[in-house]
Image (cartoon, rainbow, N blue to C red):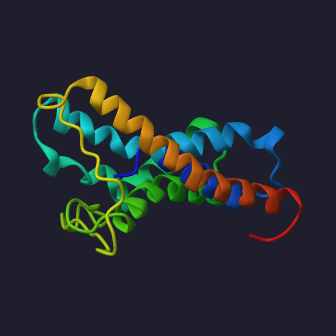
């Protein structure tokens, strides 16, 4: 499963691509918010790890279009950017999480994109991303942290260039 580094970079990339008159100096807060919004859906891991509901709760309602729309609306209210472009940008940054999970699942998991209308977890089935679903009850924390750090390094190498290309194109006035 993608870790927060990948989700955050994809969320920030969505914001950079959709911002009007983009500049790093002016829009760094929006990029940060896009990254945070793209990570938030994984808070459902609290249900599975802390409350003991198991892996089946991951990828549920927090990965849905409805949740993404609610997060986009709330982000617009909090940033006082009450406009359709801001709502769309932040909703898509949040939704990027579920879409990335759908794209990187082959056998297990996926995302309930259509919740509350359907609890079906979609996955494309093309390939599995790095297999990483830590269980603190069965694995030593040092092993979990080492594996997470290794995956985060790969995510930086994969997703940072995409983010930088989008930022460069926006700042040079080229269309994305």
Task: Indicate left or right for 78 with 21 as reference.
Answer: left
Q: How many marks?
A: 0
In the rendered view, would you say 6 is above or below 25? below
In the rendered view, would you say 53 is above or below 66? above
Q: Which residue is drawn at the image coordinates 72% and 39% (left, top)?
A: 28
Residue 29 is drawn in which quadrant? Answer: top right
Q: Nearer the viewer, residue 22 or 174?
A: 174
Q: Which residue is drawn at the image coordinates 28% and 30% (left, top)?
A: 143
Q: Residue furthest right?
A: 172
Q: Nearer the viewer, residue 115 or 150?
A: 150
In the rendered view, would you say 51 is above or below 82? above
Q: Nearer the viewer, residue 52 or 162?
A: 162
Q: Position of residue 35 (x, y in %)?
A: 55, 43
Q: Which residue is drawn at the image coordinates 75% and 43% (left, top)?
A: 27
Q: Position of residue 96 (x, y in %)?
A: 47, 58
Task: Note whether residue 74 is visible.
Answer: no
Which quadrant, please, contains the C terminus? bottom right
């Amino acid at each position: 499963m993608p870790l927060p580094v990948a989700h955050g970079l994809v969320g920030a990339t969505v914001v950079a691509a959709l911002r009007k008159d983009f500049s790093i100096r002016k829009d760094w807060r929006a990029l940060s918010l896009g990254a945070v919004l793209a990570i938030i859906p994984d808070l459902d891991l609290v249900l599975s790890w802390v409350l003991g509901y198991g892996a089946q709760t991951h990828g549920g309602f927090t990965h849905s279009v409805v949740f993404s729309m609610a997060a986009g609306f709330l982000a617009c209210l909090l940033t006082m950017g009450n406009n359709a472009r801001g709502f769309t940008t932040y909703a898509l940054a949040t939704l990027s999480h579920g879409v990335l999970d759908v794209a990187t699942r082959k056998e297990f998991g996926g995302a309930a994109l259509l919740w509350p209308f359907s609890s079906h977890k979609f996955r494309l089935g093309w390939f599995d991303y790095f297999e990483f679903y830590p269980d603190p009850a069965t694995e030593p924390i040092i092993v979990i942290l080492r594996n997470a750090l290794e995956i985060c390094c790969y995510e930086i190498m994969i997703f940072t260039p995409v983010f930088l290309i989008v930022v460069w194109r926006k700042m040079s006035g080229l269309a994305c």
